[in-house]
Amino acid sequence: MRPVPLARNQPPGRFYRGGEQIARFRGQPMQDRFSPEDWVASVTEVTGEAGVGLTALPDGRLLRDAVDEEPEAWLGAAHVAEFGTSTEVLTKLLDAGERLPVHIHPSREFAAQHLRSSHGKAEAWIYLTDGDAHIGFLPDVTEEEILPLLAAGESAPVLERMHRIDVRAGDVVFCPPGIPHAIGGGAFMVEVQEPADLSIFLEWKDFPLPGGAAGHLGLDEATAASAVIAGVGRTEVDSFVTATGQDCGDLLKGVEAPFRAHRLHGGDELDAGFAVLVTVGGSGELLGRDDESFALEQGTTSVVPFAWGPSRLEGEGLEVIVARPPKASS
């Protein structure tokens, strides 16, 4: 079983503008102005839209179906024993054509209790351009303030109570569940996250978003507000930046992430296992057993099955972002 090249997979009609940088990265025409995300190797559906967001393989099968048919070939026996047929990771190209609204993603515990979901949504942003973001409420914001802010849905009262960070291309930001955040306009990134599409909005009046339960995953406002983490200190916010453009290998050191993300170059090795590859620089190849080769080109995405085995990247100037599920404990 070989790695598989993937076509773009941009769900239309999202709640914010973008997509031009994805088109430029892939060398393809712009899709539409509300298609700012390319869901790569996705077995996850957009909330409330059956089938939307799922990746189709070149042979026409959905990746989700292919994994279900041959789970050990795609994921490995140890992974299947611990996680079943879930890939445990969702990867996106994200082009923020405008600032995103302030929102949070629930934790696994909250999602299990209130949303009948086995996943929350921790996420990591691997910036391909310079950018900025609002992330985390200031230390003096109390739990009692969150419900009125969420119910009002207005921009200024929320943003003025948040930390702001500036990032450079190559920086990596880990955003834990429950932390309010808003990626700044103009940013282009690889986003690695849990395989769920779950958002609760604290800012919605100035976006094409509904208020009330319709904007909070069907939850009443008090329950939705209970998923939001109140004020955090600047030291904690600074610790969310886990790597810079100078860092290679593991990009999520120092945090407990439910997935893995690496930056690899020519000469680096890749252990056997399910992996999502985004080639962000140069060109080269992935060499498997018996020097079997799979081409890698800047602007392409691909998925590697466990059955491909251990491999090695080769190529001058090659830079690949690799997203992977957590290691199985056995």
Image (tube, rainbow, N blue to C red):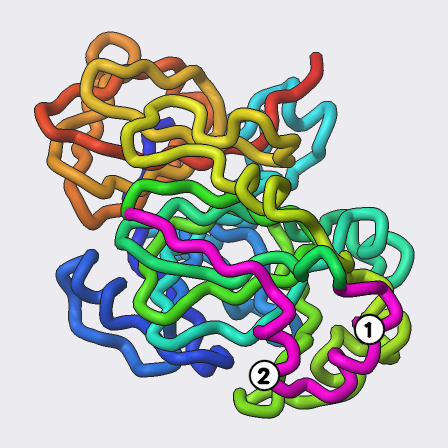
Give the total number of marks visible in the rendering: 2
Residue at 78% x, 85% y is 151
Q: Which residues are magenta?
A: 141-168
Residue 29 in the image: above or below residue 262: below
Q: Residue furthest front?
A: 140
Q: Position of residue 200 (x, y in %)?
A: 70, 70
Observer-nearest residue: 141 or 42? 141
Q: Earlier in the sequence, mark 1 or mark 2?
A: 1
Which amino acid lies under the numbered mark 2 shown in the image of this protein? Answer: Ser
Residue at 65% x, 38% y is 85
Answer few, some or many: residues within 10 Å of disc 2's Cα (few below 14, many 20 plus, some between 14 and 19). Answer: some
Answer few, some or many: residues within 10 Å of disc 1's Cα (few below 14, many 20 plus, some between 14 and 19). Answer: few
Q: Position of residue 106 (x, y in %)?
A: 74, 57
Magenta stretch holds residue 147:
yes
- Per the image, the residue denoted by label 1 is 145
Question: In which quadrant of the rendered image does the C terminus lie?
Answer: top right
Separation (CA) of disc 1 from disc 2: 15 Å
Observer-nearest residue: 279 or 310? 279
- Per the image, the residue denoted by label 2 is 155
Does residue 58 appear left or right of residue 224 in this picture? left
Q: Position of residue 209 (x, y in %)?
A: 60, 87
Which numbered circle lies on residue 296? none
* Quadrant position of residue 92: bottom left
